[in-house]
Image (cartoon, grey):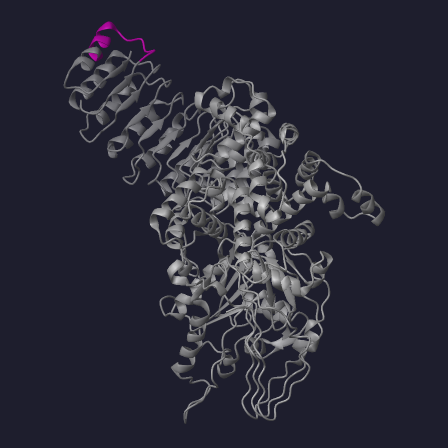
Amino acid sequence: MGSMNHPKHFKSGETQNDLGSAHQKRSDPEPSCVSMKSDWSMNHPIKFKSGDTKNDLSSVQKRSDPEPSCVSMKSDWSMDPPMQFKSKDTPPDLSSVHQERSEPEPSCMSMNSDLPLDPPIRYKSGETQNDLSPQVFNTFRSNLLKKFECLYEGTAAQGNPTLLNEIYTELYITESKSGEISHEHEVRQIETQSRRSTTEDTAIKCRDIFTPLPGQDKAIRTVLTKGVAGIGKTVSVQKFILDWAEEKENQDVQLIFPLPFREINLMKDKTLSLSDLLQLFFPQTKEMEISSDKYKVLFIFDGLDECRLSLDFQSAVRLCDVSESASVDELLTNLIVGNLLPSALIWITSRPAAADLVPSECVHRVTEVRGFNDPQKEEYFSKRISDQSLANTIISHLKSSRSLYIMCHIPVFCWISATVLEKMLSEAETAEIPKTLTQMYTHFLILQTNIKHQKDYEEKLTDEDMILKLGKVAFQQLMKGNIIFYEEDLRECGIDVAEASVYSGLCTQIFREEFGLYQGKVFSFVHLSIQEHLAALYVHLSCINKSINQFNFAAKQSLWSKTKFMFKTVALSELHQRAVVETLQSKNGHLDLFLRFLLGLSVESHQILLQRPLKLKRRSIKNNKTVEYIKKKIRTIDSPEKSINLFHCLNELGDHSLVEEIQQYLKSGGINEAKLSSSQWSAVAFVLLTSEKKLEEFNINEFVAENNKTEKLVIFKKLLPVIRECRSVQLYNCGLTGEGCAALASALISNPEHLTDLNLSRNNLGDSVTLLSAVLEDPHCKLEKLWLSYCGVTDEGCAALVSALRSNPEHLRELNLSGNNLGDSVTLLSAVLEDPHCKLEKLRLYYCGLTDEGCAALASALRSNPEHLRDLDLSWNKLGDSVTLLSAVLEDPRCKLEKLELYNCGLTDEGCAALASALRSNPEHLRDLNLSGNKLGDSVTLLSAVLEDPRCKLEKLWLSDCGLTDEGCAALASALRSNPEHLTELDLSWNNLSKSTVRLFSDLKDNPHNKLKTLHI
């Protein structure tokens, strides 16, 4: 199987119009590998029976220059099925579809069906088009089965097709917060995902992509699945279709139509109906009544990031009939919105950078393919490598290098690692086993050149010539942002089309060629990381062999300037410094991995590796200047993310001095006493983020002395990437103000489902609390504990906070707003507390200036929803008789309050009586009662009836500074003698008690039958 063009056969009477430009002579590339690629890229012959005619397709090859594309892994599903016409049939008028066109924007992921055509559908006597026999659907299903049952890793012509079900490893797919754009380098995104626990989110199996999660009450029609290049989006789609075709899953769906954006792009500006469009890809649909609700159908649009259509969802054009003609972009937008075939299911895949091309209101579920989690990595290698002992050795080696193990989240990197390590470890090679990314990719490249030597081209093409030419293409296109390129791009690098075809045949696991019915030849590297490695190798060799700095030629400069640079020599350290500068200036980090490769290639071990294939002379390269330059940049740059990549670069260069120094500080526990430099704090961030042990809690006081607010704020900014990845964030009293709060909110909103505990107490936030609202109201936010005590929260801040909690009330379990002068704003909180979805267990509102109105609203809300609250602190609020309002809550049998703090609340006799009455009605749950600072006097005798009740299980009672009398204490002691089994701690301090009363309670404590252990008196 390959992307080959089969010969055209014409029967008697048939004619052949001009097909020359559509099918140029070319060599047959072998299908390439990973992204675990299917073989959907082949062109089948177009067959015509007697009497048929052929449309002129000569205009298909005309195109304008492609726009640059942007990311890495691409599937090759981009071929069209042939159109078959029976004798005397007239093909549908599709001439408008094959007009002169512009080439679609090149991209990376693509999907197309090359389904083999069925024999003509014949009806038995009496059958109608609306009454199709099961044979029609079975044939349709069978065609899909044949196309999707195999997975191609590596070179198909070498006999490597594998049944998908034999190698398939379930990918980690979760619901995502939205289809937001991410412009970060995709390796950065992978490193971020690797730090997130797989237990935080509910995993979604591929087969359940349209099934709501437990507790979700929503119908799912349209799903957008995003994921970085090579992460497994296409394989997930392939597995879904295969399971359906094998009648294992989703049998409620009658028809699945895979429609790739790459092929749909070719019809830009054309006019046709949805019915016509389907017939182009699936001629069988001519016999089906797709317009009715008789069939449940699924449309799969792979590669939204490749889309060249306008997809104007604000367009006034409304289509409801599948036979109604319109532009292709209007067909798609009406189909996605639901005007066309509203009962049809829609599945769209995209890289993150293009995820918002479809408005969020049109999407019912956004999922994210996160690749392999740690158990799935091991499962992949166990399936991929038959020798389980060898597989275990490979897994152990990858785990020993954190940077390699992180990259194993990407299935394509697992394949590269398996390819390299299986050969090296099974053949007992003497070369050093790869421990860095650069080493792994260099070994992979050498392995491919060894494969080349087994073919017939060795005399015609040297390794050096091929690698340099491919490297030039890789570098020039990388600088332009392209990962797919065309014939003219290759010619600029001195490669003609025939030569490129040879390269794709020799190194199909590195470089590949595609050819579709409606498109010219398209070339690409198997994965962006392979392109980046070859680009780095080309720039490195240009410098050490010719003393040329290729960055001087990549920039837009005059011919005179470029000519001048040809005669200017450059040292390797100068090249490295220029590369560092170029990388740091990149807004989206698109040169991050390239820089790591470039620096890694200068290490001595790489010079030895590359000697044979590139006929290099051994030379000594000193990287001292480069190392010092990088350390200088780490000290001066503000971006924590960019400094982290520079530490990866130091790792490639073999310099671990900064990291090892910080590891010693962290192990000793004395880092908060050390005076660290800016670069050392950057090293702290790198060490914490790349550590195998995830940091669950970040406490600023563990890194900086507790009273140094200025230093805390500096360190907070340096360690923000670490904070973003922690479950618990403790930023108590660190001088955080509006600017810091904005940075924190921005970091947390990027990962809202991760954080469970946030403490910002004793920071003067004021109205900046409103910035946190976007985090709290996000439905994916699962914050359980929020402390904002003494933060100067204003009425506006409280209102924003309450509004966010009303939007997402289900997760918060503890809220502390103490020390903020809220006053009547507490009434706003009532709307949250009375919501039946609110499950708040701890509420702390001490010293908040509560008014009678606020207390009444609070009590009313708790009466409406009393089942969850376990801990209520209203201390230091002048409640007075308002405490009686709480009685209705406490006496409710549904109330399970365990701790009640009313310290210094101005309780009156009436309030104390109401409180005691309520507790007598419902005494079973309360464990801790604090009434200190209230002048209770003899009213404490009212509590005796509660304490002596055998159902009462109070364990702690605080009555400090309550003006207790001997009479009241005698009643209290009597109650404790009646029910001695539960109370363990009693505070009677700061009461003017007589010696006899003191002796009374001392005797109780000493009584072995009484559980009282702690007595404050």
Query: Can residue 735 be seen by looking at this rendering?
Result: no
Task: Decide which of 718, 738 is in the foreground and name it.
Answer: 718
Is 426 inside the magenta-drawn segment?
no
Where residue 840 sits in the image (x, y, percent)?
39, 38
Residue pushed farthest top? 995
**Quadrant assignment, res 275:** bottom right
Residue pushed farthest left? 1009
Above or below, 150 against 604 in this view is below
Where residue 574 sits in the image (x, y, percent)?
71, 35
Q: Quadrant of the C terminus?
A: top left
**Is 905 left, or right, of 60 in this rendering?**
left
**Is 19 left, or right, of 605 in this rendering?**
right
Q: Give the number of callouts.
A: 0
Where residue 244 sits in the image (x, y, percent)?
40, 68
Residue pushed farthest right? 560
Task: Decide which of 1012, 40 is in the foreground and name it.
Answer: 40
Is 993 inside the magenta-drawn segment?
yes
Where residue 671 sits in the image (x, y, percent)?
49, 21
**Quadrant assignment, res 498:** bottom right
Above or below, 794 against 378 in this view is above
Q: Which residues are magenta?
A: 989-1001
Query: Can residue 785 be seen by looking at this rendering?
Result: yes
Above or below, 44 against 265 in this view is below
**Is 231 left, or right, of 717 in this rendering?**
left
Task: Decide which of 512, 606 is in the foreground and name it.
Answer: 606
